[in-house]
Image (cartoon, rainbow, N blue to C red):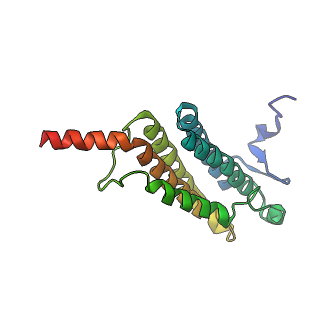
Amino acid sequence: MKIYTKKGDDGSTGLLFGGRVSKNSIQVELNGVVDETQAAIGLVRAFTQDKDLERLCVRLETDLWVLMAEVATKPENRGKLVSGKTLVGATMVSWLEEEIDRISTLFEMPREFVIPGGNPISAYLDVARVTARRAERASVEFTRQVSDTEVGRYLNRVSDLLWTMARWQEGEALRTRDVFERELD
């Protein structure tokens, strides 16, 4: 099988369960940004030695495939989607909230704005976070067109989780910076 089909040479792309849309449609734009988010999370996974962080990254990457499947489906085919497999379900959003709450107990929450780059892993997580925020902004029009979707809420929580993960991974760097700043006073 060849990687190229030539079907998209006309500026269109295929959808799950059939149909085609323009490559500049909201569905394709949104899935493109989600794909970038997924790749940024993959970068974190490639460099971490932390098994808990790696597990979280794999779960996020897998769940983002579910979101992309939902987005790549024509409205008339939404009835074919399966929650947790090809449709973002409320339980996926709940899992994100549970992970945010769990990870928040692992470090002291910063009391001021955070400057990204405390260490490489937290910096990669912040890149994933800002990409997820862009995906969330891109989802606004999609969620206006598809009223029975959790895509917007899910992306909002993904970016919150990525922020929390970055601060968790930055924990030691934050403590070191605080000590350094106290010594300067």
Residue at the spot 49% in from the left edge and 48% down from the top edge = 129
Task: Tell me if I can see residue 152 in this picture.
Answer: no
Residue at the spot 66% in from the left edge and 64% down from the top edge = 91
The extreme right residue here reads 1
Percent position of residue 181, x then y? 19, 42
Percent position of residue 38, x then y? 61, 43
Picture quarter containing residue 80? Answer: bottom right
Picture quarter containing residue 166? Answer: top left
**Quarter of the image with the N terminus in it:** top right
The extreme top residue here reads 2
Percent position of residue 2, x then y? 84, 28
Give left or right: position of 176 versus 44. left
Compared to 76, does 123 lie above or below? above
Which one is in front, 108 or 138? 108
Residue at the spot 56% in from the left edge and 39% down from the top edge = 40
Residue at the spot 75% in from the left edge and 62% down from the top edge = 83
